[in-house]
C-alpha cells in the first residue's frame, strides 16, 4: 500500500528514550530528516542549547552524536503539528507512568498521553503514516491506537482519507549505557502485521544493525516481550538482593555467591549486583502493569508472583534504612549523614524511582540532617523528589538536607557516609583523608559494594557492606 522510502521521521517525546534513540537514528540515516517534538518547551530549548553541556539528559557519548547531527538532519521542536504533518513514520515515545488515581490506580499505566498523541497524529498527519510504539505499553495498546487513528475519519488537505499502520518496536536501552545499547543492540524487536510498513522499519535499522538481530513477531508478543524482559531483569535483582540479606545473616559473601552462580552459563553473570533496590522509570511500572494485566485475566497467582518482586525491592530499601539507624546507636536525630549518589544508577542524571529517594526521606523523618552529593543531579531535582513539606534552606537549625559540590564537603562533620549510587569516583575515595573530617565513630554504609572494606577499616571506619557479614 505504501512503498515509498521513509524521508521524514517524527518522534513524539524528547525524553530519555526519544532523545538518545533519535540521535543514533540521525547518525546512521543521513538522508532522513528526523524531528523530535515535545510539549515541554524548556526541554526542547535545552536540546537546542548551543552549549552542548546543557542537554536535558546526561548520557555518555550523547553530546558527540547531537553535535554531529543537530540542525543537519536532527531537529528538536515544540511544533508538533508541523512535525507530524511532514512525517512518513512517527515514533511514539511519550511517558506512560503508573496511574495515581482512578481505575487501576497504583498498577495500570496512564495512557492519557499516548491517546492524546494518537489523536494529534489523526488530526495533523497527511496521506499514509506509519506509527511506531516505542513507549512501553500495556499489551493490546496498539489496538487502541489503531482504533483512534482509523475511526478519526480525518481527511488530508488533498481530500484523501488518511491511512495508518501501527507497529510495536520497544526500546531496550539501559540508561547510562544507552548509546552503546542503541548502536549495538542485542536485538531489535518489531511487532506488526503490515508487511510493507515492517519492511520500511527494518530497512532503517539495517543501516547499522545486522539482519539476524532483527526479529519479527506479532504485535501482542512484541508488547508483552518488553514487559517480560523488564520483569525478568527486575526479578534477578530482587533475587540477588534477597540473597544479600541472607549472606549478611550467615557469613556467606554475596560477591562469592554471585561469582559462583554466574559461572553457570544457564544463569549467566550479568545483572547479579546487589544494591539498595532497583530504580528507574521502567521496572516498577512495567511489573505493576504485568500484575494488573494478570489480575484482569483472573490469573491471581501469577499476579502475586510478580508482585513479590516489587515487595522485595521495597523491603530492601526499608531494611537498609532501618539498619543504618540501628547501627548508629538507634537514633539519627540531628546527626549529619553524607549521602553519596542520588541518581538511580551511575552515569545518568535520572532519579526516577531511585532508591535514594525513599532512604533519604526515611532518614529525614527520623531527624537526620543529610548532605547529599551526586555528580550529575542538581538540587532542584532533589527538592522535587524529596517533596518535603517544609524544607527550610535558609534556617540552619531546621535544615533537613543540603546539596554539596564535592565528596569532601559532603562528609564534613558527618557520623556516616551512605553510598547509594555506584559512581566511579566513589570507588577511588582515599578513606584515610576523609575520616579526619568526620565525627567518631565514623561509619560507611556501602549499598553498592564499591568500597575496599579492609582499606576503609584500616583508615578507622566501621563498615557495613551489602551482602557482607558484619557482627
Ligand atoms: C518514556 C516512558 O517512560 C517509557 O515507558 C517508554 O518506554 C519511553 O518513554 P522516557 O523517555 O524515559 O520514557 O520518559 P521521559 O523522559 O519522561 O520523556 C517523555 C517525554 O514525552 C517528555 O519530555 C514529555 O514532555 C513528552 N510528552 C509527553 C509529549 O511530548 N507529549 C505528551 O503528550 C506527553
Ligand atoms: C532497564 C532495562 O535494563 C532496559 O532494557 C529497559 O529498556 C529499561 O529499563 P534502566 O532502568 O535504564 O534499564 O537501567 P538498568 O541498568 O536496567 O538498572 C535498573 C536498576 O537496577 C538500577 O537502579 C540499577 O542500579 C539496578 N541494578 C541493575 C542492580 O541493582 N543490580 C544489577 O545487577 C543491575
Image: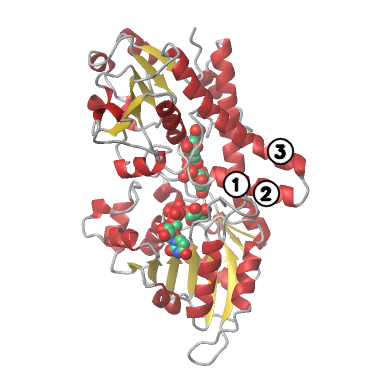
* Between 300 and 232, the one nearer to me in the picture: 300
Q: Tell me residue 160's x, y (percent).
A: 55, 90
| Mark 1 vs mark 3, CA separation in Å | 15 Å
Q: Tell me residue 121's x, y (percent).
A: 51, 74
**Residue at 63%, 49% in the rendered image:** 289
| Mark 2 vs mark 3, CA separation in Å | 10 Å
Question: Disc 1, disc 3: CB below 8 Å?
Answer: no
Residue 312, above or below 294? above
* Between 202 and 401, the one nearer to me in the picture: 401
Q: According to the image, label 3 marks what residue? A: 304
Q: Tell me residue 272's x, y (percent).
A: 53, 30
**Residue 250 falls in which quadrant of the image?**
top right
Q: According to the image, label 1 marks what residue? A: 106
| Mark 2 vs mark 1, CA separation in Å | 9 Å
Mark 1, other Cα within 10 Å: few <14 / some 14–19 / many ≥20 = some
Question: Disc 2, disc 1: CB below 8 Å?
Answer: no
Mark 3, other Cα within 10 Å: few <14 / some 14–19 / many ≥20 = some
**Residue 167 falls in which quadrant of the image?**
bottom right
Residue 245 in the figure: left or right of residue 10: right
Which structural element holds mark 3?
A: helix
Question: Disc 2, disc 3: CB below 8 Å?
Answer: no
Residue 211, above or below 448? below
Q: Say which quadrant the N terminus sits in.
A: bottom right
Q: According to the image, label 2 marks what residue? A: 292
Is there any visible trace of residue 17 in the rendered image?
no
**Residue at 67%, 45% in the rendered image:** 291
N-terminal of the pair, mark 1 or mark 3, is 1
Mark 2, other Cα within 10 Å: few <14 / some 14–19 / many ≥20 = many
Amino acid at each position: 500500500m505504501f512503498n515509498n522510502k521513509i524521508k521524514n521521521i517524527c518522534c513524539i517525546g524528547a525524553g530519555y528514550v526519544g532523545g538518545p534513540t533519535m540521535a543514533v537514528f540521525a547518525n546512521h540515516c543521513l538522508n532522513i530528516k528526523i524531528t523530535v517534538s515535545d510539549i515541554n518547551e524548556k526541554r526542547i530549548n535545552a536540546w537546542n542549547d548551543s552549549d552542548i553541556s546543557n542537554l536535558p539528559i546526561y548520557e555518555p557519548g550523547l553530546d558527540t552524536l547531537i553535535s554531529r547531527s543537530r540542525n543537519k538532519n536532527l531537529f528538536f521542536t515544540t511544533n508538533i503539528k508541523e512535525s507530524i504533518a511532514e512525517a512518513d513514520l512517527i515514533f511514539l515515545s511519550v511517558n506512560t507512568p503508573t496511574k495515581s488515581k482512578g481505575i487501576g490506580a497504583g498498577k495500570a499505566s496512564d495512557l492519557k498521553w499516548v491517546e492524546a498523541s494518537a489523536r494529534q497524529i489523526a488530526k495533523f498527519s497527511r496521506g499514509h503514516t506509519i506509527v511506531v510504539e516505542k513507549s512501553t505499553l500495556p499489551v493490546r495498546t496498539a489496538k487502541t491506537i489503531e482504533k483512534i487513528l482509523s475511526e478519526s475519519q480525518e481527511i488530508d488537505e488533498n481530500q484523501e482519507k488518511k491511512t495508518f499502520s501501527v507497529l510495536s518496536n520497544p526500546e531496550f536501552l539501559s540508561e547510562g549505557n544507552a548509546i552503546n545499547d542503541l548502536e549495538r543492540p542485542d536485538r531489535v524487536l518489531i511487532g506488526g502485521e503490515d508487511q510493507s510498513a515492517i519492511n520500511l522499519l527494518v530497512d532503517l535499522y539495517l543501516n547499522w544493525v545486522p539482519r539476524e538481530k532483527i526479529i519479527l513477531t506479532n504485535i501482542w508478543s512484541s508488547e508483552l516481550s518488553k514487559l517480560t524482559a523488564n520483569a525478568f531483569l527486575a526479578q534477578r535483582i530482587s533475587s540477588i538482593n534477597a540473597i544479600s540479606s541472607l549472606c549478611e545473616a550467615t557469613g556467606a559473601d554475596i560477591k562469592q555467591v554471585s561469582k559462583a552462580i554466574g559461572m553457570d552459563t544457564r544463569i549467566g553473570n550479568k545483572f547479579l549486583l546487589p544494591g539498595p533496590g532497583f530504580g528507574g522509570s521502567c521496572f516498577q511500572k512495567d511489573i505493576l502493569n504485568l500484575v494488573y494485566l494478570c489480575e484482569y485475566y483472573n490469573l491471581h497467582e501469577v499476579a502475586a508472583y510478580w508482585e513479590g518482586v516489587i515487595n522485595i525491592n521495597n523491603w530492601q530499601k526499608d531494611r537498609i534504612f532501618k539498619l543504618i539507624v540501628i547501627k548508629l546507636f538507634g537514633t539519627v536525630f540531628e546527626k549529619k549523614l553524607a549521602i553519596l549518589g542520588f541518581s538511580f544508577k551511575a552515569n545518568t542524571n535520572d532519579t526516577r524511582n531511585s532508591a535514594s529517594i525513599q532512604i533519604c526521606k526515611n532518614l529525614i523523618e527520623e531527624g537526620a540532617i543529610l548532605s547529599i552529593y551526586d555528580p550529575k543531579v542538581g538540587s532542584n531535582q532533589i527538592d522535587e523528589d524529596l517533596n518535603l513539606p517544609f524544607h527550610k534552606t535558609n534556617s540552619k537549625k531546621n535544615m533537613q538536607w543540603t546539596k554539596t559540590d564535592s565528596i569532601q564537603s559532603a562528609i564534613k562533620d558527618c557520623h556516616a557516609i551512605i553510598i547509594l549510587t555506584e559512581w566511579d569516583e566513589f570507588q577511588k575515595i582515599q578513606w584515610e583523608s576523609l575520616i579526619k573530617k568526620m565525627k567518631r565513630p565514623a561509619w560507611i554504609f556501602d549499598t553498592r559494594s564499591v568500597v575496599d572494606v579492609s582499606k576503609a577499616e584500616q583508615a578507622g571506619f566501621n563498615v557495613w557492606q551489602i551482602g557482607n557479614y558484619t557482627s
